[in-house]
Amino acid sequence: MNNNSLDTTSKRPPLSLPFYYGWLVLSICFLTTLTSAGVRSSPSVLIHPLEAEFGWSRTLIASAVSMNLLLFGVAAPLSGYLIDRFGPRKLMMGSLLFLIVGVSGTMAMTEFWQFFLVWGVVVGLGAGGVGSVLTATIGNRWFVARRGLALGILGSASSTGQIIFLPFFMAMITYAGWRLGSMTLIVVAMILLPLIFLFMRDDPADVGLEPYGAGQTGAASGGGAASLRGMPAKNATITAKEVVSHPTFWLLAGSFFVCGGTANGLIGTHLIPHEIEIGIPQIAAASLLGIMGGLNMVGTIFSGWMIDKVQPQRWLALVYALRGVSLLILPFVHNFTGLVFFAIIYGLDWFATVPPSMALTADTFGRQNVGKVYGWIFMSHQIGAAIMASAAGAIRTWMGDYQFAFFSGGVIAMIAAGLALQIKSKPKEAAAPPAAVPAGA
């Protein structure tokens, strides 16, 4: 297999594979996050149907979406704690059950408070359990070599979910109604449950393995994976005081606040309604978001590959700057051709912020602390998303269009690029060997 074996006699993988078992774990995590993203992103194509069927205002619907995004973030520190205590496998199954209950309740709702409860609260908490904290934990627990690539693949799961679900969901809404489309999401989530139960494992040590590449000289990321040593190199448990006293935490939280506002909050929630209002057909509008998701899948995997080569904070700043440029262009776009140009620039950097942010968290605070620390950073991301989702909806109601909201998003993305550049890298510790990471890390 390679040199990643620990104890193949007492603990064995559930399946005998010709490749490292962590790649199967990564695939299961990818599919789970993909499904969660498909559920979580569907309000962007539900806004017009809900307005038409129930007579709810744009601002009212946006408030439920904002609660969903906020709880998606609030769930992140909780999911980090639960992952550290019970393991990713149990959390993934519990979160999928939450999503199934929430989407089922949405199909039966008749009043806005019901939508707010099942979508804003239940689905928000369920999606938060299988969000970026899970992918950060899996990528850093199972991989030393190819860690950036693994994080890039997992980070692209959200965009892949949008590629698959959004155009399909919009077509279902157009031809069969939104409830039938919601049923599809439930079926996919139910199929995943037995796969997780049978084949998902929490840690390489559970199947007698070490993290992929552990013990290989030079296995860690070349551009910065071992270059930030703001915390003990042996992954000692970190205290809350140590986290909040470290400037990197606040720089990551601040830039990720902007990331959430300009991604899930602004574009993820309001781009499709904006496209429809400027005359783009509904299915074409959803397809454009799917195209963005496809480009983002490429961009996010490439971003993960790049942080194996260069300092992640510099790459993170470049990604934010490109996002700012795309959002500053958007107010001047009024046709489908222009939107395709926007989609290319924005799509390549949509989730490309995730791999470098995860890597900087692990490198600064330690691999075993990724769940709890990144959970708080990701909560900042979703607070930004919730604020921007509501603010953009209010701006649309007040000014009649989204132009000022898009322009503001471009400005704050440029500010985030500046914050990323302030993250300081430190030289490698002379005494720290490039050797094995403990299997239980």
Image (cartoon, grey):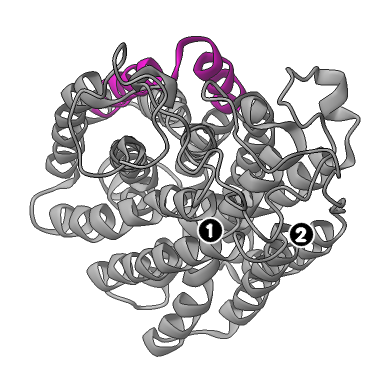
Residue underneath mark 1: 304
Query: Residue at (62%, 60%) from the top-left corner?
Result: 307
Q: What type is the residue that disc 2 sits on?
A: Ala
Whether residue 34 appears in this view of the structure is yes
Seen from the viewer's position, the closer of residues 111 and 359 is 359
Mark 2 residue element: helix
User: Which residue is rendered at x = 85% and y = 43% of the image?
Assistant: 429
Please state the extent of the stretch shown in magenta in the rendering. Answer: 74-103
Q: Is residue 391 visible?
A: no
Closer to us: 382 or 374 = 374
> Above or below — where is 398 with respect to 107?
below
* Magenta stretch encompasses residue 117: no
Q: Main secondary structure of the magenta part?
A: helix
Answer with the quarter of the image where residue 193 lies.
top left
> In the displayed structure, does residue 24 sit left or right of residue 419?
left
Q: How far across and how far down the image is residue 350, in percent?
A: 52, 62
Q: Residues within 10 Å of mark 1 (few under 14, many from 20)?
A: many
Q: Is residue 230 left or right of residue 66?
A: right
Residue that mark 2 sits on: 416
